[in-house]
Amino acid sequence: MANSNLIPTNPSGQPAKDDPSAKHDPFASLRVANYRLYAAGFVCSSTGLQIMSTALAWEIWDRTHDAFLLGLAGLARALPVILLTLPAGSIVDRTDRKRVLAITQFGFALVALLLAFTSFQEAPLAMTYMLLLLSGCVRSFNAPSRGALLPSLLPEGGFENAIAWQSGFFQFAAISGPLLAGGIIWWTDSTAICYLVTSVACVVFGTTALFLKPRPVAPRKNAPGLRGMVEGAEFIWKEKTILGALVLDLLAVLFGGATALLPIYADEILHVDAVGLGALRAAPYIGALAMAGWLTMRKGFNNAGRALLWSVVGFGICMIVFGLSTSFWLSMVVLAISGALDNISVVVRHVLIQMRTPDGLRGRTTAVNSVFIECSNEVGSFESGLVAQWLGPVVSATSGGVGTLMIAGLVAWMFPDLRRLGRLTDTAQDVVAAEEAAEPHRGLGTEGQ
């Protein structure tokens, strides 16, 4: 074994990131107490929110059997994020990110508590949609605060490993959440209990967030007013590789996502109950969890752009097979494979954005990223529900898969820099800092880290 003293280091004393002899530590992030505290709260909150999402889908479908209203729930969650993203990102970059994260988690807890009350009282669905709008307002601040805070909880150079672990934690939560929701509904015949569990889980993350100790963020002179709000969007527009990854994810999931159709498939096509629905919702995350475990054990992609594009192609094929399937177990398998492929996209996109973004812009770029995520997931749910209402769920799912294949080819042609993207470590933040030092007057004016 080579002596660690012989490994080249950078000025901070860490092993040089491009040194092939540097040993990869799959558990590097977990050795950081700050990250462990964050991860514990994140798992609790994510599990609770998955429970709430599954319970909401089941309750709306059980009460209405209306695909349009099922898709409308996703739109209600997405609209506030789209409308509030610019001010939310700017506020996160100007204030204590840890405090914003804690406040948003307590906000989720309050929304879940109110949902429990409306469910107990069997209140009109209009109240449920109002609370979904409120949860969307909370989400518009939650995602930027989490995304901007996380890099400051870790030593420099440990972010890619942390994203792989966080993806795994999310997949674990996304597996256990729907299964727990299905079990709770089956055992108690009540979605209100699910919402109460969510409320407690979010309080846990809000509390742990208050004890985090992030590194101080280098001061940054932000432009005033609207100009400061749009800096994150301007940065992404100039970084064509990031823009291509976001466009790919937005359009692929917008047309290829079948999550909103799962209650319909469970009830009318696969003929399973709430437990079966929970299993179907968990299946993509089982595959994603397996992929996340594999990603933590490797150093990274040598051809990240190709991996990203081919993973989207595979995702589209899975959606076509799922749309045509009448077998519960075949549907479970293809959903699991789709989740594994989608996780490649998630890891590449998040690492790419954070490693190319100066610290003072992370809140705003993460806010813009959250708009793409919300548009693809929630507006995609609305689109799937709308097409299912008009043409049926099978046409909705299969046509979405075909659309995803077309989008992958189009993005590969429009963004050659994304297609040629190599190692994600080649896009580290110090490269951005060097570029900005060479172009001090290009308008983004940041001191970096």
Image (spheres, rainbow, N blue to C red):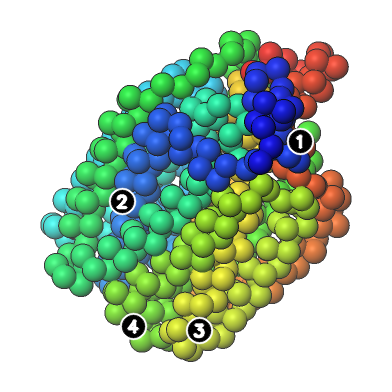
Q: What is the CA distance from the residue labelled 3 to the residue labelled 4?
A: 14 Å
Percent x, y for residue 393?
Answer: 51, 79
Question: To which residue does mark 3 refer?
Answer: 330
Q: Are marks 2 and 1 in contact (CB under 8 Å)?
A: no
Q: Are marks 1 and 3 in contact (CB under 8 Å)?
A: no
Percent x, y for residue 87?
Answer: 52, 27
Q: Where is 124 relative to 204, above or below? A: below
Percent x, y for residue 92?
Answer: 49, 25
Q: Amino acid at mark 1?
A: Asp
Q: What is the CA distance from the residue labelled 2 to the residue labelled 3?
A: 28 Å
Question: To which residue does mark 1 refer?
Answer: 18
Q: Are marks 3 and 4 in contact (CB under 8 Å)?
A: no
Question: To which residue does mark 2 refer?
Answer: 48
User: Pointer 4: residues within 10 angstroms few (<14), some, or many (20+)?
Assistant: some
Q: What is the CA distance from the residue labelled 2 to the residue labelled 1?
A: 39 Å
Report which quarter residue 337 is drawn in: bottom right
